[in-house]
Image (tube, rainbow, N blue to C red):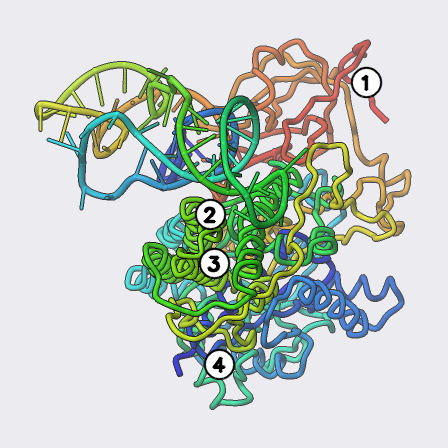
Amino acid sequence: MPRFFLTTAIDYVNSRPHLGTAYEKITADVIARFARMRGLDTLFVMGNDEHSQNVFRKAREMGLDPVAYCDRMEDEFRGVWRALDISFDDFVRTTEARHRVAVERIVQRMYEAGDVYEGAYEGWYCVSCEAFKQEKDLVEGLCPVHRTRPEWIREKNYFFRLSKYTQPLRDHFAAHPEFLQPDVRRNEILRLLEGGLEDISISRAGQAWGIALPFDPQSVVYVWVDALINYITAVGYGQDEERFRTWWPADLHVIGKDITRFHCVIWPAMLMSAGEALPRQVYGHGWVHFRGEKMSKSLGTAVEPLDAVGKFGPDPLRLFLVKEIPYGGDGDFSWERFEERYNADLANNLGNLVSRVAAMVDRYRGGRLQARGGGALAGLAASARAQALDAMTRFALHEAVAAAYAVIGATNEFIAQAEPWVLAKSPDKASHLDEVLYEAAEATRIASALLWPVMPDSVAEILRRLGHPFDPRAPRFDDTQWIASGERHVIKAEALWPRLDTTGATPVPVRTSVTDPSTPVPEFVPGPAPTPASAEQATPPAIPAADAAAAPATPAPAPAAAEPQAPTSVPADDRLGIDEFMRLDLRVARVLEAERVPKSKKLVKMRIDVGSEERTIVAGIAEAYEPEALVGRTIAIVANLKPAKLMGIESNGMVLAASPEGGKPELLSFVDPPAPGTRIR
RNA sequence: GCCGGAGUAGCUCAGCCGGUUAGAGCGAGCGUCUCAUAAGCGCUAGGUCGGCGGUUCGAGUCCGCCCUCCGGCACCA
């Protein structure tokens, strides 16, 4: 039997699952279920990413053994996946023994291939980001993302010769245009490859939480690298050769668009180095925004999927996410929109159709129907079936759903035209009524069956009512064909999806989840599988030796920015002493001249008066301020910063401005401007 | 700034290799049946297809320039 092996990104355990994470799992689940329907021997794997320093820390804070903490989180994740009806077959935890074996094996192979070499790294390291920072990445000596002081570390690192695989990767992309989809993401990677790749660090020294390098037990595999390997762990790499040969390479890695680089550059290069085949395809889905905004836990907009699921079960949410968001692009979720779609798609259309068909068959024929060939609707159902199949092979999940809905709409029209209630009044139309009823029922059944991968539970119920249930454990795509023989016993039952009152008079049962204040916001969320919604505009932390080209390929803990920690809740041990604060030389300054830095988007070069002297300072505020408007203005600066070059201009100091997440900076200003040079403290 | 994508009815979007009166769904308005969850069905949107110019017998549909938005990268010290 043909096989189909797909995976989703594994999740960073410190960050609870939310709508964005759920979206990835749901769409992957739809793909997996469809594959099973088509008779493919399907293996669908997910998992948790646990070897993060933050996980270790968090566990300690809670007074737990790290593994015990991860056990707890696993339960939580599994609980959510269960509630969402995600049919994964295996769940890989990176702390499992089988994963350690796989990691050791592939790293050893890479080492033996001569692709791993020893080097030293010295520099800043932000524990929260779990990434190296270059001096230029720091703001006021702090990690720009976490506002925490990075550690200066000096350690032995092992590097992977990623550079060596630049050309092989280019060739692979050229030979396999389908390797990375959708095209937008593919273009980005192609461009990255054009620029060439740099080697990357794949280890950390002096840490216990992680998997030791087989050739140097003092070092641990860098968490991002560790995480990617889960895909082969799942199929027995290093443990069960036969199983591995049976399933690898994976047919599809479903991931968020922010981590395409890891999956389309680093991961394939690792596999090439180890002499293994590359996954056939990687699909980078988009984000699910909330009311047009990126989701943010601290803003209370990280929608808890369970909120929707709690009231309606998983299917309405699953349908919404799959039907409303063209797969591959970003989408938007709002409760208003959700309710609108619920009423239109489920209550008014599919649900009502099932009700009216069942009611008529029950009333006019005692629930009995004789199967027979169909008319125009049968033709439409057949073409919808073909369209759905075609759409699914392109991962155009929304199109597949639309095809099924075309049949639902047509069936409603058909009923209105045929007017079974009129036929029922004339005994001589009995035969015609039989035909009409069956045609409507069968078209409804087919449309529903096509939706099974999206709404497995609801569809199973619909099929039961329509008298031709299929085994939910072994649904068959063949069942979406018109059945012309046999007898049906149709069951009339209560409404599947009662209409929601959206007039506003009645509070809707669903609500927006606001992060439970008692739940500490995770410090940070790296992990190879940052959830889409949480991966906002984070700055990819650089891996040592990696800059220009490689930096982008660096495991960018995008989520960092996604979880803007409540600014007030600074961990106690990260607070500063007054002496430390006093080291900052904050001064009042006056802008003498200001001009935009040519060819830059946000830089403004200013000549400022700091009382004792004049100096040049460059600030990234061009998007918020016109240079002319700055002249004469009194601002606040950090005066004792080391000089830095920006676009070739040396900047001596930094202007202070409020910088909202994703918004424009607002300069600090004074109601009654003090003299330039005045100390601020 | 560079690269890529997008800009079509109130909303969300289809419109392939250029060709009759530019479409769908939702919302809204009107009408209507009554099997059904006050659901369904029908009709209604007169939209400069972002703007300007060009190619062509003919252009949302191709070319050039411009504007706006999004994403990635390059500078947010």
Q: Which mark is residue A444?
A: 3
Q: CA distance from mark 1 to mark 4?
A: 61 Å
Q: Which mark is residue A81?
A: none
The amino acid pointed to by label 3 is Thr
Between discs 1 and 2, the one toward the N terminus: 2
Q: Report crowding for label 2: few under 14, some 14 to 19, many 20 or more residues within 10 A (C-alpha).
A: few
Q: Quadrant of residue A51?
A: bottom right
The amino acid pointed to by label 4 is Arg
Position in image of residue A385 (x %, y %): 38, 61
Q: Which mark is residue A109?
A: 4
Q: CA distance from mark 4 to mark 2?
A: 75 Å
The residue indicated by pointer 2 is: A422
Q: CA distance from mark 1 to mark 2?
A: 90 Å
- In depth, the one of B39 and A34 nearer the eye is B39
Q: Chain of mark 3?
A: A
Between discs 1 and 4, the one toward the N terminus: 4
Label 2 sits on a secondary structure element that is helix
Label 3 sits on a secondary structure element that is helix
Q: Which mark is residue A678?
A: 1
